[in-house]
Image (cartoon, coloured by chain):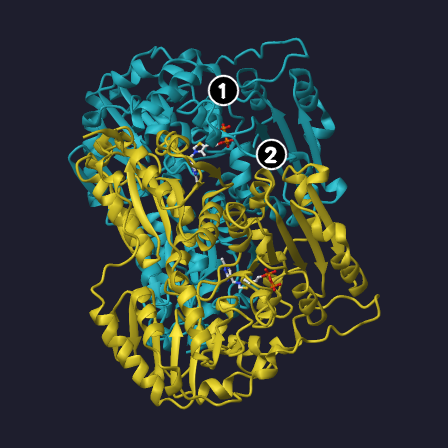
Chain colours: A cyan, B yellow
């Protein structure tokens, strides 16, 4: 039996699962553990603070399938908890390793720094139980490898964050390396029986349905079965929509894919078809009020079957399954000839591209003329991140080039998340397609986490930031407080950001546009298009301006919450 | 019986307790509540993000005695939880108001944005129970005023943060204004009996003692009795020390005050006297390892009596008291003639000012020649904030001018706290003395929360930031990983900070010093000394450099935690 240190075991295991980077901020309880990252074949990515590092890990996991975050006890982990709770809400698998005080200090309930000073040293771990799907406290060399394996497995198969406590005195403890010989089983084991029953059940309902609908989002870990979902959509021909946060999940070339389910504010109103559906197969839906126009676009739960990575849920029943096995069987056993659906569902014209209206070049940019033009910047294989503000709603109707990955919040909606997430996503992308990362960001969002730009600069990542400067929280103005000072923010000089955060002159492109003429010229400029590295485009729009067709949405949102 | 809206009641009450500002970040669940701030006579202070706003509220409370923070459900409150936990650990009274979803949404466990999507809508409130001393959920108009009064009272009298949930649909609910006629009782009620017993007990022990010691810190709410403590120190003549985080608590002109209890790294070693003490009266001590050189300076708990705002604790017993009543009686009944202590405690020479060694002006600044010089910048009535890094240890021996208030972490040690705290402290100070706020900050600390500089600029506060640029986490390097990349940070252009964050040319002074000559010239420059507004002094020191006498401390710290 050969041995290695516990920290080495931990990081080696994480690396084996495809994670090449550990995000985080060091602290005295975690320092020694970090020494084991390079010899495990991974790289450390220090964030400016722990919340940013958490968001970055979330973005990394959304592209790479898994991420690791390492913070220090108390101050570090609590700073990151909002990011981890968001990953939990949106089913993003992040392994959060926390460096904790040595065991003897914990046992004696010492008055250690970063504690509350009252001996309640397990408080943070208790909090984390609420927002992670599995936890391990590595206080015992004998079972630590097994615990690590178990939580990583849970992380991946449940597609949710997990929490690992690594006491400082355990870092160099020797543990058996035996288990490392066998790769972790990262898919559920199943004898296929329950899946067969469910397939039969779903198919019989599909054969009976007259107006079936497939609705696709990215919650509940269903990105794991994205290929199978696409195959099923393709072969079945069943009318298919995505939720706004599920944009990009379905190959837009499928003729039975009708774009995002935006209801009355969509290009074509998807509500009539969806509401009259007699059977809805919903993959990983996140039915939060923000993306369902206050639940008004949520299909009737009585006719909806929800598929998650590990479960099938109907109105009154939840059944555990392995969704991959289920989907394969579903595709195999589907008898297309027995399916029925309207030959014209009334949504066909969503595909006809909006003509970009032409304006006098001196026309000021506003959020109605802006968004369709931003759409034109996207290229195949890009990652597009939508800040949790107007961007999230305004870009929901984008016509996406092939293989564009969208990162957009369907549930958590935490302002500030997307800039650090762009760091993580761009880094993960560098490992694979090498495409570009495009962030559509509000100024309020930018101010929350702006310093993470410096990590983007330091890592020389290819990120384009479209920063919409409207002097405040327009999203909120339209919900309540149109002129209230609480919706104003300080006026920053955004074009100075990259220089302040350390970029060298040629490493970054800074642009500012105020008219349609400026914008069109910039987007058409080949140097701009092909320049790599960081590009920041500050877009000036009016303080009260939002996309015309969203006004109603905001008013509704205001009414809903109160 | 007259009525007013619940939100108005809440803010009016908070205002009555001396709080003029509400810190926070708005969200759709809190927007309507914020409308009630101006008519309650208060001002809104928007932070760039919620953690910063939380830190700022903490800083405000440390100067003003109480602060208010308002965030939105889930994403907002979780982003701030590290600041509130810190306030809990260090006994800082902050009222945290959270705008929560309307009651009907909570009752139906709706799939609301900012929730985890699984109906567990009370998770965040459960977390906050761990780090606040009292909580109220204002779901009922009938008892809401009483609940508000109770938690505010708890906040002040326990000197710890409290948590108030205000559902969006309750904001405009009418409640009785009757209770507002009577000011809240913010001091404990007592018949004085227990206090009398305790005074007798303490005095009899003091009369027996041969080497008594008074040790003063700012934990446990004892700033409430700072005048009484000073009076007792003065009249008793008992040898007195402060903990490092208690610097400035005792009037330095008292001849029996011997400075900070820094043990062997102090100007004079305080350990021999402290360790041989046969009776220690410790006011609000925070005996965390970071400020006790790994607990080595903590006096024998068997001879220590700890006084908190509401309790007296000995080795084996805790008794509830009102410390104000207790202190007054203690002072009244003290018979100085019965006290005994050495006429020379061996610490007298702490007062003789270090001569500032003179160097060739071209001598590079290092952390050994730097700190005594920074000391000379301080003036009476300043607030000095010490970042939770090298600054906290290096400035512990400063000779403080009269009435200088020190904000330094004795327990929580959260890096990044002090820049936002400087915003809150400077704002609170503007309301009273009008003195200056001086922040001694590391570059790593600065990067965590840098954007709060923009709020300082927006509010035109008088803040001087001495920013020590050493390219990373020197504090950590000396604990572990001297050359490790995880202790490096990105190179920012700090002199561009103020401009980037929106300051106009004349509103800010930007300075950079690399030699002793630069530094001396700057500190002696009358324009620099008298200039109001924001001043940023970037001080360049070596990457590995720390104050000579702290090297040992760091090594010890590294050994302690693992
Ligand atoms: C962490 C967090 N805090 C507060 C909010 C409430 N909130 C929702 S939208 C918004 C404004 C975002 O502003 P900006 O990014 O400038 O976009 P705009 O509103 O101008 O489109 C805020 C503060 C939130 N969702 N998340
Ligand atoms: C929120 C938080 N994250 C991490 C740490 C661990 N930590 C302690 S000191 C330190 C470095 C501070 O760096 P800097 O402010 O540059 O000061 P220096 O070490 O150079 O004196 C860090 C990251 C902490 N205490 N708090």
A519 over B538 or under it: above or below: above
Q: Chain of mark 1?
A: A
Within 10 angstroms of label 2, few (less than 14), some, or many (20 or more) residues?
A: many
Q: Chain of mark 2?
A: A
| Rendered residue at 61%/69% (across/down) | B398
B347 over A124 or under it: above or below: below
State the residue in front, B509 or A29.
Answer: B509
Distance Cα–Cα, label 1 vs label 2: 19 Å
Q: Could you say where residue A129 lies in the image, as x and y percent from the top left?
A: 30, 55
Within 10 angstroms of label 1, few (less than 14), some, or many (20 or more) residues?
A: many
Quickly name the residue at label 2: A465
Residue at mark 1: C-beta within 8 A of ligand 1: yes
Q: Point out the frontmost of discs 1 and 2.
A: 1
| Rendered residue at 55%/37% (across/down) | A446
Residue at the extreme left? A316
Quickly name the residue at label 1: A546
């Amino acid at each position: 039996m050969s041995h290695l240190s516990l920290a080495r075991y931990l990081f080696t295991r994480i690396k084996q699962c495809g994670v090449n980077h550990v995000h985080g901020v060091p602290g005295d309880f975690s320092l020694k553990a970090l020494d084991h990252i390079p010899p495990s074949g991974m790289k450390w990515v220090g964030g400016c603070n722990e919340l940013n590092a958490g968001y970055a890990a979330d973005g990394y996991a959304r592209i790479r399938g898994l991420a690791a975050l390492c913070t220090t006890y108390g101050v570090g982990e609590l700073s990151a908890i909002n990011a981890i709770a968001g990953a939990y809400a949106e089913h993003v698998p992040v392994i959060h390793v926390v460096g904790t005080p040595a065991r003897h200090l914990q046992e004696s309930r010492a008055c250690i720094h970063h504690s509350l000073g009252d001996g309640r040293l397990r408080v943070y771990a208790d909090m984390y139980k609420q927002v992670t799907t599995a936890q391990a406290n590595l206080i015992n060399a004998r079972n630590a490898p097994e615990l690590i394996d178990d939580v990583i497995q849970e992380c991946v198969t449940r597609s949710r964050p997990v929490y690992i406590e690594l006491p400082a005195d355990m870092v160099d403890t020797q543990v058996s390396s035996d288990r490392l010989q066998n790769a972790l089983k990262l898919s559920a084991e199943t004898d296929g029986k329950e899946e067969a029953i469910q397939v039969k059940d779903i198919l019989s309902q599909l054969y009976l349905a007259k107006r079936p609908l497939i609705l696709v989002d990215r919650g509940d870990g269903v990105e794991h079965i994205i290929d199978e979902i696409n195959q099923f959509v393709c072969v079945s021909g069943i009318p298919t929509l995505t939720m706004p946060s599920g944009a990009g999940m379905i190959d837009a070339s499928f003729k039975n894919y009708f774009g995002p389910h935006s209801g009355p504010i969509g290009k074509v109103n998807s509500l009539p078809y969806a509401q009259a559906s007699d059977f809805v197969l919903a993959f990983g839906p996140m039915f939060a009020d923000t993306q369902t126009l206050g639940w008004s676009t949520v299909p009737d739960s009585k006719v909806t079957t929800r598929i998650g990575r590990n479960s099938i849920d109907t109105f009154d029943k939840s059944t555990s399954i392995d969704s991959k096995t289920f989907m394969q069987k579903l595709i195999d056993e589907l008898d297309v000839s027995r399916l029925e659906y309207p030959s014209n569902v009334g949504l066909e014209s969503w595909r006809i591209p909006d003509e970009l209206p032409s304006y006098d070049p001196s026309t000021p940019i506003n959020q109605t003329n802006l968004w369709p033009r931003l759409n034109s910047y996207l290229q195949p294989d890009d990652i597009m991140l939508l800040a949790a503000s107007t961007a999230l709603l305004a870009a929901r109707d984008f016509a996406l080039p092939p293989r564009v990955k969208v990162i957009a919040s369907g549930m958590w909606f935490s302002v500030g998340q997307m800039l650090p997430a762009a760091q993580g996503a761009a880094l993960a992308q560098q490992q694979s397609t090498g495409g570009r990362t495009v962030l559509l960001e509000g100024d309020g969002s930018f101010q929350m986490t702006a310093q993470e730009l410096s990590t983007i600069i330091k890592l020389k990542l290819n990120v384009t930031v479209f920063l919409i400067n409207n002097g405040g929280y327009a999203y909120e103005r339209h919900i309540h407080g149109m002129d209230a000072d609480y919706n104003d923010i300080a006026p920053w000089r955004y074009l100075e950001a990259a220089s302040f955060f350390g970029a060298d002159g040629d490493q970054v492109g800074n642009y500012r546009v105020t008219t349609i003429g400026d914008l069109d010229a910039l987007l058409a400029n080949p140097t701009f298009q092909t320049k790599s590295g960081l590009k920041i485009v500050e877009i000036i729009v009016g303080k009260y301006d939002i996309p015309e067709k969203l006004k109603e949405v905001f008013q509704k949102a205001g009414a809903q919450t109160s």
